[in-house]
Every structure is written in structure tokens, then in C-alpha cells.
Amino acid sequence: MEPLVQISLDLTTMDDALSVAGAAVRAGADWLEAGTPFILAEGMRGIRALRNEFPDTPIVADLKAMDGAGLKAEMMFQAGANLVVVMGQAHDASIIEQVKMAKRFKGKVMCDVMLCPDKPARARQAEEMGVDYVVVHTGFDERNMIKGLSPLDDLVPVLNAVTIPVQAVGGLGVDQAIQALELGAQSVVFGAPLVISDTAFKPADPNLEGVLRDLVWRVKNTTIGAKRAQ
């Protein structure tokens, strides 16, 4: 299996989101993420615009749903999203309802275990409830307050707990992303600080497409699980 690259559109204007998305797709990224700031700013209109502009690219709606997860997922699927995100900290009922809605629309559910007290246990429970992916996520505020935190801190125990694909996200540099893949993650997300500014919901680099081409090439030339097999 080839590693998947997801680009986080944690932006607040349609122009910025479509510009960064275009650069990402041209650079070879696999999935586009309608980040939470973009969903807050543009809602279903933003999802529709991404779907119209990039009809063949999977779109992740990062709802971070904690309640009403099924109904919120329905809105995103109807607008054109392929995958939606529910929080592992949500009630079981929210995860179950989002899984039901995904099956109805032939979509997928990603469960984000950020801040779960026992991430491996919650990941295993989420898999049993029918989610398609587990997201090991170190949050924006968390890693800015506590320097040095990374998804790598939690990744291996979660990988050992589930059989479904695991994604690593949260301030990853390219070297960290490659390490996550070598440990067994199947996909990585690039947002802040490489794609999005680490201090504002704005693009990070005027030469973004060149940056993205380089990181996509490096990720695609990484063997998933290479370090676990040793």
C-alpha cells in the first residue's frame, strides 16, 4: 500500500482554500481536508466548492463532531464530502450514528482519539463500532502550549490496538511524517506549520506548491511499516 498524503485546509476564506487545494492536487496530494476553520467559515458551501473544483479528489470534512454526529455527517455527505470525523471523546451513540450515516451515503468515518485518556482502548472500541480509520492527533493548542508533543508519542500503542488504517496528524514535519509511516501509519496530514501558518489560519508559504511537491515525493517513497518489520 502506498502512503496517503492529506492536506489540511485550515483556512477561513474560499479563495485561500481553493488556491491551497489546487496547489496540493497539482503536487500529488491524495486527500483534501476541509479543516474545521474552513467549515466554520464556509460550511456546506465550502464543501460544495471543493467538490465542484476537484471532482475526483476525496474530501475529508473535519467536523470534530461531539454530538449530533450523524446529522452533521449527513450535511457534509450531501454537500460532497467522502469522509467525516467524529471525536473519540464523544459518546458511543455519536460514533454509532455517524457510522450509520456513512453507510447510508457510502462514505467513511474517521475517529479522532485526541485527548482520550486511553487512546488505544478507545481506538479499539471505535473500530468495533464500525469506524473506518483512527486518527492519532496532537491538537493545535496542546502542542503550542506543551512544546515537543507529537502524534509519534501515541502512535505505536494505537497501531497495536487496531486492524483498521491509522492516520497521524498534528504539526508534523516531513521527517516526523516519514517516521510515522515507517512505524505503520497509513496516512499523514500536513497542515501547520508546513502548509498553514502556525500562528494564523493562513497559507504558510508563497512557494507552497514547490514545498508540497517535495513532501509528497518524500512521503510516497516511504515504505509503510519499515521500522516495525525490523
Image: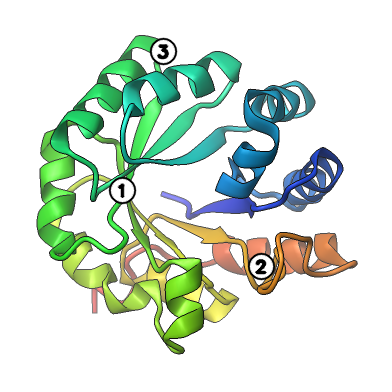
Which mark is first along the chain, 2 or 3? 3
Give neighbour class at mark 2: few <14, some 14-19, many 20+ (Cα, 10 Å): many
Up/down of 185 relative to 228, above or below: above
The numbered dot on residue 105 is 3
Secondary structure beneath label 1: loop
Q: Amino acid at mark 1?
A: Pro
> Residue 185 location, x and y as percent?
35, 61
Closest to the observer: 97 or 218?
97
Tell me which corner region of the image, top left, top right, bottom left or bottom right, holds residue 179: bottom left
Q: CA distance from mark 3 to mark 2?
A: 32 Å
Q: Amino acid at mark 3?
A: Phe
Q: Nearer the viewer, mark 1 or mark 3?
A: 3
The numbered dot on residue 45 is none
Which mark is first along the chain, 3 or 1? 3
Query: Can see residue 178?
Result: no
> Residue 215 location, x and y as percent?
66, 67
Q: Are marks 1 and 3 in contact (CB under 8 Å)?
A: no
Q: Amino acid at mark 2?
A: Leu
Up/down of 112 relative to 209, above or below: above
Give neighbour class at mark 3: few <14, some 14-19, many 20+ (Cα, 10 Å): some
The numbered dot on residue 165 is 1
The residue sitting at 78% across, 68% down in the picture is 204
Up/down of 124 relative to 142, above or below: above
> Residue 157 location, x and y as percent?
17, 69
> Residue 184 location, x and y as percent?
31, 64
Using residue 65 as the reference point, say whether residue 145 is left or right of it.
Answer: right
Give neighbour class at mark 1: few <14, some 14-19, many 20+ (Cα, 10 Å): some
Residue bearing mark 2: 215
The residue sitting at 79% across, 50% down in the picture is 20
